[in-house]
Image (cartoon, rainbow, N blue to C red):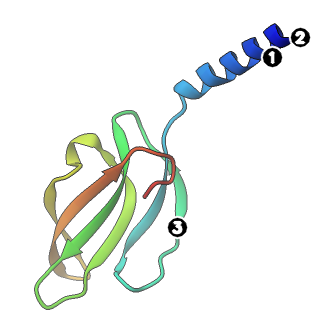
Amino acid sequence: MGKPLLLCLAALACAGLGAALQCLKCDFTAFDAPCQLTPVTCQAGQLCATIRGHAAGHKTIVRKNCVDEVKCSTQDTATWAGVTYTTSYTCCQGDFCN
């Protein structure tokens, strides 16, 4: 009885190894405004991320989504509502960790 249970648990563990990462998605929004979060499935080579944008004299903006792993811990620029922001990417590796 113990051997079939052990085999079943091993099969379930192996099945989970190939599962794609699940993250939260939120379009750009002002930092304090609520955001509609939806689940998304990342592609291979992507991680969950929170992207924060800063521009002098403007509110911080936030976006959540899957991003290519090479973007993690980097800075970039993005334009939202006609303002160009310096954006930073903070990544994590667990399902819905962002």
Q: Nearer the viewer, mark 1 or mark 3?
A: 1
Which residue is disc 1 drawn over? 5
Query: Where is residue 45, by image quadrant?
Result: top left
For the residue pair 19 and 40, the one nearer the viewer reads as 19
* Foreground residue among 98 and 42: 98
Mark 2 Cα-neighbour bin, 10 Å: few <14, some 14–19, many ≥20: few
93 in relation to 15, above or below? below
Number of the label disc, if any, that sits on residue 1: 2
Between the residue at mark 2 and the residue at mark 3, the CA separation in whole angstroms equals: 44 Å
Amino acid at the residue labelled 2: Met
**Contact check, label 1 and label 2, Cβ < 8 Å:** yes
Q: Residue furthest left?
A: 56
Q: Residue at x 44, y 43 (%)?
A: 42
Q: Residue at x 80, y 8 (%)?
A: 3
- Identify the residue position indicated by label 3 in the image: 37
Label 1, label 2: how many angstroms apart (C-alpha)? 7 Å
On the image, the x and y values in percent for residue 92 come to 37, 49
